[in-house]
Image: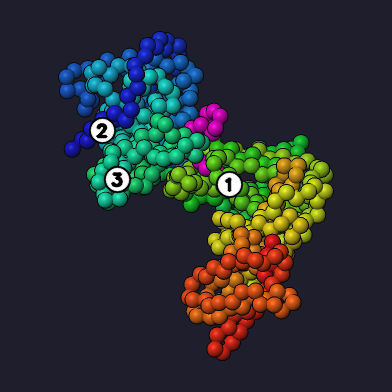
């Protein structure tokens, strides 16, 4: 059975437009691909197809300017960039493709033959081989390039076998046939097979379709399994050994690449000739400000010559990433990959990007040295650091990670403090780094230190030995007594601890160092802490 999908995602107010009469620019996204999607802007008479139940359909041109045609082509091309398929505006390319590996999308002002819809297509028609097209109705989309591109990718998705990505509540009740996504700004996300007119970051998705909340549709798997084509070949290796070597010319380099799969990582090697400042702009393909039309949220990881991670760059509210740091002479590596964000899942952050690197020798930097050191002393993690800089420290935050990727604030010591020790509550290997900002507006990260937690000793532990909030937190494995002494031996607090997290109000304690003693029937332990 041929399934007709009517897309009424969003109908905007119809306004007048002058029909385009200029020659449509000839554009191809991947000329070597066998599979073809033809974007037909200049009008077409449709006959002898599955649409023609009442005779021929006469479609006028799209009513779009050449600049709009180019933007729509670029947006749709980026949606299909990971795949081995050519998006084209050239009818001769369409006719040269195998009949069962091509699709014509007619972008037209003519919609009265069908009705009010953003577009319409038959599910799975890409492989029918009978030239049945899909339609996008430009006038009903108010001649808006962004919305027309979204509708085009959506309708092509239907022809490739996809149904709608729908939206359900927690009780499995359908809210809408179209998942409208979530979020605001540059990283606002929606599925291509939902409705993404108001969202910048529209992607393929793995979610419930319109036939039920348990009917999960993996868009990528459907596209690459039933249409005769799959992903493009990987353009850059993901290994250190086979990293693409990138050289500076006039202290700059420019590299392009594509993240084709959600497991893809592209690795690049470059050399710094002398101490200086290295900058990198990692930019996803886009058609305008705010990374408009991008399909890739870029994460960049920087490694030294020993393949040790220096830092990860992935701004939380942007799709692009920036590096601005001082490096010594030597070999370094960049790892590029697509990631999700607070709105978008990690499923299909895919697409093309450019890397623009720069180097300035002996650049005047606020920071000469920022080194973090750490040791494990019984059950404590003891950290200390060195900051050698001309500028004044305005904030320093000791950050912690249990997975080596996502760091969060552990403590914000005073600007003159250079050490911190505490007893971790998490098991396994814990990683630390120092985030320092200076009064000239510059911000730097230290090296990463990994320490393994020894959790064999079952006794109460301070959550931290620097008390800023007025509350002392103690994690206890059972019932214990505690006593707090000042450095003169005077008892200031005492009480009982129970299993779990316990809080002690440090009211009355002046700034300075104190000793806390924990005890049960058999043993006792002492720790030091500082009230600040």
Q: Closer to the N terminus: mark 2 or mark 3?
A: 2
Residue nearest the observer in this picture, 184 or 393: 393
Mark in the foreground, 1 or 3? 3
Judge whether 493 appears above or below 95 on screen. Answer: below
Residue 409 occupies quadrant: bottom right
Q: Residue at x 58, y 83 (%)?
A: 519
Residue numbers of the magenta segment: 286-298
Element class at badge 1: loop
Q: Which residue is mark 3?
A: 168
Q: Closer to the N terminus: mark 1 or mark 2?
A: 2
Q: Which residue is mark 2?
A: 5
Q: CA distance from mark 2 to mark 3?
A: 20 Å
Quarter of the N terminus within the rendering: top left
Q: Which residue is mark 1?
A: 314
Disc 1 crowd rating (10 Å Cα; few below 14, some 14-19, many 20+) is: many
Q: Closer to the N terminus: mark 1 or mark 3?
A: 3
Q: Is residue 423 rendered magenta in the image?
A: no
Disc 2 crowd rating (10 Å Cα; few below 14, some 14-19, many 20+) is: some
Residue nearest the observer in this picture, 236 or 276: 276
As drawn, is 293 to the left or to the right of 222? Answer: right
């Amino acid at each position: 059975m041929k399934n007709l999908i009517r897309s009424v995602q969003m109908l905007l107010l119809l306004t007048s437009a002058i029909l385009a009469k200029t020659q449509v620019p000839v554009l191809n996204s991947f000329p070597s691909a066998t599979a073809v999607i033809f974007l037909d802007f200049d009008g077409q008479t449709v006959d002898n197809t599955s649409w023609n139940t009442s005779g021929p359909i006469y479609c006028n041109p799209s009513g779009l300017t050449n600049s709009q045609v180019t933007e729509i082509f670029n947006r749709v091309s980026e949606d299909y960039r990971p795949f081995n398929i050519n998006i084209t505006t050239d009818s001769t390319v369409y006719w040269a493709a195998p009949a069962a590996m091509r699709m014509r999308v007619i972008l037209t002002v003519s919609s009265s033959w069908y009705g009010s819809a953003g577009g319409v297509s038959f599910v799975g028609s890409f492989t029918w081989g009978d030239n049945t097209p899909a339609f996008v109705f430009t006038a009903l989309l108010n001649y808006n390039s962004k919305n027309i591109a979204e509708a085009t990718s959506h309708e092509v998705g239907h022809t490739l076998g996809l149904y709608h990505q729908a939206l359900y509540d927690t009780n499995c009740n359908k809210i809408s046939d179209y998942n409208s996504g979530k979020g605001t700004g540059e990283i606002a996300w929606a599925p291509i097979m939902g409705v993404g007119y108001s969202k910048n970051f529209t992607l393929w998705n793995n979610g419930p379709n319109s036939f039920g909340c348990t009917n999960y549709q993996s868009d990528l798997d459907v596209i690459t399994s039933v249409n005769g084509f799959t992903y493009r070949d990987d353009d850059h290796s993901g290994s250190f050994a086979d990293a693409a070597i990138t050289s500076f010319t006039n202290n700059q380099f420019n590299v392009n690449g594509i993240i084709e799969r959600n497991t893809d990582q592209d690795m690049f090697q470059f050399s710094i000739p002398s101490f200086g400042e290295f900058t990198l702009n990692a930019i996803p393909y886009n058609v305008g400000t705010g990374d408009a039309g991008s399909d890739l949220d870029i994460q960049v990881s920087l490694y030294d010559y020993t393949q040790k991670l220096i830092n990860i760059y992935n701004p939380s509210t942007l799709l692009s990433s920036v590096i601005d740091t001082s490096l010594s002479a030597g070999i370094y590596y960049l790892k590029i990959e697509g990631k999700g964000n607070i709105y978008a899942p990690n499923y299909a952050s895919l697409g093309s990007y450019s890397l623009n690197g720069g180097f300035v020798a002996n650049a005047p930097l606020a920071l000469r040295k920022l080194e973090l050191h750490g040791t494990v002393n019984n059950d404590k993690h003891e950290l200390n650091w060195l900051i050698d800089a001309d500028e004044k420290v305005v904030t320093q935050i000791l950050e912690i990670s249990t997975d080596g990727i996502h760091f969060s604030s552990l403590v914000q010591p005073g600007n003159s403090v250079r050490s911190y020790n505490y007893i971790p509550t998490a098991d396994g290997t814990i990683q630390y780094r120092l985030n320092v900002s200076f009064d000239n507006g510059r911000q730097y990260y230290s090296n990463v230190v990994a320490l393994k937690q020894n959790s064999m000793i079952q006794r109460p532990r301070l959550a931290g030995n620097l008390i800023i909030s007025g509350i002392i937190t103690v994690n206890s494995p059972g019932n214990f007594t505690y006593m707090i002494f000042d450095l003169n031996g005077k008892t200031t607090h005492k009480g009982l601890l129970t299993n779990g997290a316990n809080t002690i109000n440090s009211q009355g304690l002046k700034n300075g160092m104190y000793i806390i003693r924990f005890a049960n029937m058999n043993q006792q332990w002492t720790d030091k802490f500082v009230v600040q």
